[in-house]
Image (cartoon, helix red, strand yellow):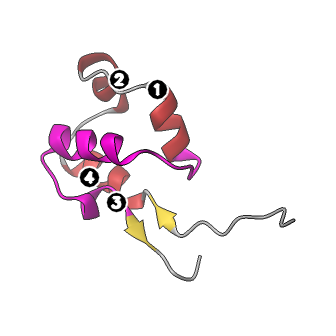
Amino acid sequence: MLNWVIKMISYEPFYKTLIEKNITEYYLIYKQGISANILHRMKHGKNITLKTLDTLCFILDCDVSDIIEYKKDM
């Protein structure tokens, strides 16, 4: 059994999008109802659901590529 996981999905674009749109995590949690656990998972490179991805795209009025990116050689 492998004890390590190669993470190929990055949430870097999400944090850049927040900065560009002047949106805080506080706003996402307390004004838009995004779970703090979801943001914690993203911060630590863990999986989120497609529904969550869809919701973030709607809230931020952006494309999927503004939330996640695929990095082949991480």
Dot 3 or dot 2, earlier in sequence: 3
Circle number at residue 17: 4
Q: Position of residue 65 (x, y in %)?
A: 27, 64
* Mark 1 nearby-residue class (10 Å; few <14, some 14–19, many ≥20): some
Q: Residue furthest bottom?
A: 73
Q: Nearer the viewer, residue 22 or 59?
A: 59
Dot 4 or dot 2, earlier in sequence: 4
Residue contact at pointers 4 and 3, CB within 8 angstroms: yes
Residue named by callout 2: 29
Residue contact at pointers 3 and 2, CB within 8 angstroms: no
**Considering only vertical position in the picture, is 38 above or below 15?**
above
**Considering only vertical position in the picture, is 28 above or below 44?**
above
Residue named by callout 1: 36
Mark 3 → mark 2, Cα distance in angstroms? 19 Å
Dot 4 or dot 1, earlier in sequence: 4
Amino acid residing under circle 4: Thr
Residue 68 lies in quadrant: bottom left
Dot 1 or dot 2, earlier in sequence: 2
Dot 3 or dot 1, earlier in sequence: 3
Amino acid residing under circle 3: Pro
Please give left or right for residue 60 compared with residue 3 in the image: left
What kind of element bears circle 4?
helix
Name the residue rendered at 28%, 47% in the picture: 19
Please give left or right for residue 43 compared with residue 69 in the image: right
Residue contact at pointers 1 and 2, CB within 8 angstroms: yes
Q: Is residue 59 magenta?
A: yes
Amino acid residing under circle 2: Ile
Q: Which residues are magenta?
A: 43-68
Q: Position of residue 48 (x, y in %)?
A: 46, 45
